[in-house]
Image (tube, grey):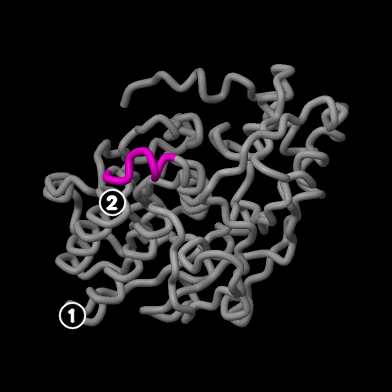
Amino acid sequence: MKILITGGLGFVGSHIVNRFIDAKYDVVILDNRGHTSCLNRVNIKKYNPKIIVGNIQDKSVYEDLDSDFDLVINSAAETHVDESFERPTDFIDTNILGIHHLSKFCIKTKTPLLHLSTDEVIGNGKPLYENSMTLPTNPYSATKASGECILHAYGYCYGLDWKVVRLNNTYGTMQFPDKLIPYFIKKLQNDEKLPIHGSGKQVRFFLNVDDFVDAVEIVISKGKNKNIYNVSTDESYNVLEVTKMICELMNKNVDDCVEYIDDRPFQDPIYLSNSDKLRNIGWKPKRYLKETMPDLIKWYTKNKSFFKLDNRSI
């Protein structure tokens, strides 16, 4: 099987790339080599995958792409809620216009598209089912909800074959240290304070990235076309609980490490995502935060320079 993976040098995309290359798929990566992309995430010497540098919102990038892919997986996205307030047009360009151009490519080449979305499209505090009304509460989630709408429309109008998998708070090795877990680990390594927004009681469900890749494989093989699948665990923690877990494992006193700062005005206290539909076709989480956190801290301790060393050109 020949697969195009956009955002394949990002955190989630690279884990998909590595799994699929190990499975002997012919993988081509399209990535913009932005600040969170990292060549170190893919074993270039071992795998030597074809890497194309470009943005999915750039119409010209599709002119030179092969037309014989069996599948396209879109993991390219602008993902930071905070930054979506500061530069919303970048989020619109990538998460909406990019989906338009990628979908048109898939329509032209008759290639199925698997799109990565987010549980945040449903908004705050309401149970999220695949057929729930989307009520995004920030520019980021609004662009992701819009991307899903494009797929629905293009499937109806142009016959696009699509599937969507919605992530929640994904964690694992090789995650850029601007997300909660690697960010706090790095802060403690540098003896810096851990900034907690508001009370720290915001609840999140944490999904191991390898469990997510398991879900991608199952949706590809067993999922129905033109369907959405939520990928979520039953394991929830509030931010302060995760902070305490990290501090204890790194032999730090949480009271000495935490610095409470003003809450974000757009902070949603909880997202509730139901994954029964996915579980009914054979998926279930196998890796849990409390059990995997020690090894995760060891990885980030051993690989402090992982992102600093990524200065190679391609």
Residue 75 lies, with reference to residue 294, above or below; the image says below
Based on the displayed image, in which of its 4 quarters is residue 301 positioned?
top right
Q: Which residue is depicted at the point 49% across and 77% down?
A: 130
Left or right? Give the position of 60 relative to 14.
left
Residue at image position (63%, 32%) is 183
Q: Position of residue 26 (x, y in %)?
A: 37, 52
Question: Which residue corresponds to the image point at 73% horizontal and 59% vertical from the top-left?
Answer: 236
To which residue does mark 2 refer?
Answer: 92
Query: 246 above or below 220?
Result: above
Per the model, the C-alpha gap separating discs 2 and 1 is 22 Å
In x, y percent, where is residue 219? Answer: 49, 71
Q: Nearer the viewer, residue 271 or 269?
A: 269
Number of other residues with Cα within 10 Å of mark 1, as a class: few under 14, some 14 to 19, many 20 or more: few
Q: Quadrant of the C terminus?
A: top left
> Which mark lies nearer to you, 2 or 1?
2
The type of residue carrying mark 1 is Cys
In what element is the residue under mark 2?
A: helix
Q: Specify few, some or many for label 2: CA neighbours under 10 Å numbering under 14, 14-19, or 20 or more.
A: many
Q: Would you name the residue on which mark 1 appears? A: 157
Relative placement, left or right, of 288 versus 101 is right
In percent of the image, x 18 and y 63: which residue is there? 104
Start-end of magenta stretch: 83-89
Q: Main secondary structure of the magenta part?
A: helix
The numbered mark at residue 227 is: none
Q: Is residue 172 magenta?
A: no
The amino acid pointed to by label 2 is: Ile
